[in-house]
Image (cartoon, rainbow, N blue to C red):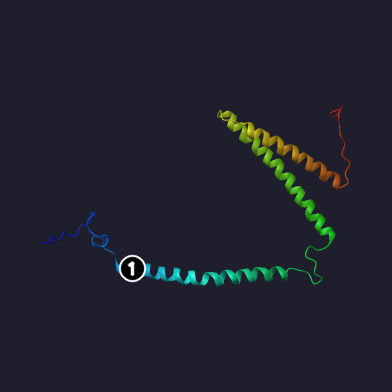
Amino acid sequence: MQIEQPVSHVPNRYTPFTTHMTVKPYLLRMGDTLMRCAQWIHLIEPLAILAGWLLTISLSAFAQTPGGGIFGSDQQVGNAIREGIKWGRNLLFLMGIIFVAWAVVNYGTEKPATKQLVAAIGCFAFGGIVALVFSISQGNAVNFDTGFGN
């Protein structure tokens, strides 16, 4: 003879999961709808990726000028390179300042700060070299003042 246990709100490890849970019908319908949507998305995904890939490739072809030159004139390329060097120089100096601040915080909290100081010195040194190369490429004279203003 089998004894039926009353359905309660406290789950019993011997009863099936669904016997003690009350699920509302609209939650079941919503879950079923979401599962169907996920299945459709799974079926359409390869076609959507292929269409996006083809669209991306065709848009790069439309970006060309009628003559076929992608980058424009030599002057535009040179200006773009100079602007890139300027942004890189500024970014290196900014990173040097950030590394110095990080080293000061680490030193104040008694953590190792040597790596941050070496990184800051490297950023400032390389930024200085880039600034020197940029100045020379602009045709400016670079004076090396050994008298420190005297």
Which percent across, then down, holds residue 49?
A: 57, 68
Give the x, y percent position of residue 143. 87, 36
Q: Quadrant of residue 3?
A: bottom left
Q: Position of residue 92 (x, y in %)?
A: 71, 42
Residue at screen point 78% across, 69% down: 65
Residue at x-position 73% and y-position 47%: 88
Which one is nearer the viewer's eye here, 118 or 104? 118
Q: Which residue is mark 1?
A: 28
- Determine whether 13 is above or below 58 in the image: above
Image coordinates for residue 110, horizontal then vertical, percent: 56, 28
The N terminus appears in which quarter of the rendering?
A: bottom left
Left or right, residue 33 beside residue 48:
left
Which quadrant does the C terminus fall into?
A: top right
Q: Quadrant of residue 60?
A: bottom right
- Looking at the image, is 84 positioned above or below residue 67? above
Q: Left of 110 or right of it: where is 139?
A: right
